[in-house]
Image (cartoon, rainbow, N blue to C red):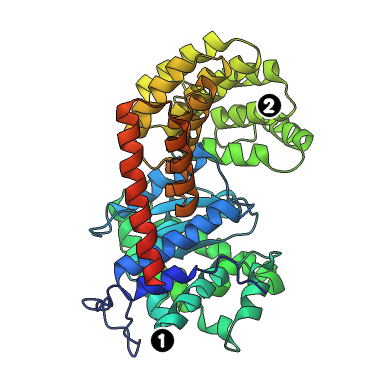
Amino acid sequence: MRLPWLIPPLAAAMLALAPAAVAEGLPDLGDVAQVDLSPQAEKQIGASIFRDIRLREASYLDDPEITGYLNRLGMRLVAHSGEARQDFQFFVLRDSTLNAFAMPGGYIGVHTGLIAAAQSESELASVIAHEISHVTQHHLARMVGKQSQAQLVSMLALAVAVLAARSNSELATGAMMAGQAAGLQSQLNYSRDFEREADRLGINLLENSGYDIRGMGSFFERLQNFGRLYENNAPVYLRTHPLTTERIADMGNRISQRPYRQVPDSLDFLLVRAKLKAQEDDAREAVTHFASLVKERKFSSEPAAYYGYAVALTRLKDWAGAERELGQARRFKAASPMVETLAAELRRQQGDADGAFRLLRAAAQRYPQERAVSYALMETLLGAGRLDEAQQLGVADVQLYPSDTRMLGLLAKTYALLGKVARQHRTQAEVYVANGQLLAAIEQLQFAQQARDGDFYDQAQIDARLRELKRQQAEEMRRR
Ligand SMILES: [Zn+2]
């Protein structure tokens, strides 16, 4: 049986790169074995598992607004971690169970069920702060302990599979069956010492980032209650991050020593939760849910309730109805790019491309960093056949975000529609490079060479890039 997300053999070779003493300078945690795993190797292993999840895991949530929000929240915390390398990446899996997990190298996955269960933004931030601390302290690598290098790779893959396991997925079962050692799962839980350390550092991150540290106490208590309710089906998070009475008391102590701080939820947090809720279940049920929320005024945020109502209505293709409810959300001066992209989409669906452009161009001015706005603008241009403008936008955008596979894909599509074959393949090659698929990238560049419709400058670029990728490919073959 295939071990899910098993790391390709090349990662084994990467491990040999730099067996630096990672554990140096870390707090002493008793007899924890020293780990021969450099931060670079951790990063490469994490990147490889993450790529696999992104490309193959059906529950991977490919929503730039939700992912964008989670990354803003995560990076706000990371900024206070004192970590010199801050290339963390946060992603979401559409799964109703309560779980979050950290992979080596700073890749942190969060289930939609956990976002839904958080009753405040500080609660969500508290779990993420805890996970960030597992990463900055290299707990996963230290938990797996001293192994032969080949074993280390598969143990880490296995650890991630266990941490990420979802209640009904084959993931856990597959990982268990592939597991070399009996009772492996029990070894793959974070130890009490690691948990205490992640709690302590997590609370500091929360506090320094301006969140309400009581969020951590209340969320872990809620998790514990879930655990009591569903004794045999306790959240996987509790199995992998054992929650003891002592831990809760410890958290309570730390929290009670700090001054009280009221921190309101951001509008984005409320909108993200509404969007997730509106996409759950049957479309009609979702519409009924939000209709009764606004009717009975049982919401924690009125604009978010109307926004969720609008999202739910789009699932029934009731564009006019959705526009009406989104208008209600706007009455509260709900300023968010999520409102603008939805408004533009509703205009577009009703045949008003110009109206969609006006909204998106204004949103792009106001929120220049928001990826979802750039994608929507690009898609609207393509849909309207305004290919030259799409090319202009795409070219400028990939200069800023050279490994953004979604934008690269849209630009490749633009070139295809324009009949610029060499540039189409040249751009598609970069999509594959970003996905770690070197051979496919090389093939695309060869197509680009054969196309011969590029100018001298294009050809020179294609040749140079092809030489570079071939060299990389040869290097990887040598390492295997
Ligand atoms: Zn933990």
Regarding residue 364, the answer to whether it shows in the image is yes
Q: In this view, does 318 lie to the left or right of 471?
A: right
Q: The residue under label 2 is which amino acid type? A: Thr
Q: In which quadrant of this rendering is ligand 1 seen?
A: bottom left
Q: Horizontal and vertical percent for residue 127?
A: 46, 59
Q: Is residue 403 left or right of residue 258?
A: right
The residue nearer to you, when weighing 62 against 113, is: 62
Label tally: 2
- Measuring 42% from the left and 42% from the top, which residue is drawn there? 430
| Res 252 → quadrant | bottom left
Q: The residue under label 1 is which amino acid type? A: Ser
- Measuring 56% from the left and 41% from the top, which residue is drawn there? 273
Q: How crowded is mark 1: few (under 14 residues within 10 Å), some or many (20 or more)?
A: few
CA separation, marks 2 and 1? Answer: 53 Å
Q: Is residue 467 above or below residue 292?
A: below
Residue at mark 2: 314
Q: In this view, does 36 lie above or below 312?
A: below
| Res 352 → quadrant | top right
From the viewer's perspective, is the residue at label 2 or at label 1 nearer? 1
Question: Is the residue marked 2 within 8 Å of ligand 1, measured from its CB?
Answer: no
- Measuring 44% from the left and 48% from the top, which residue is drawn there? 442
Q: What element carries label 2?
A: helix
Regarding residue 241, the answer to whether it shows in the image is no
Q: Is residue 393 above or below residue 141?
A: above
Residue at mark 1: 148
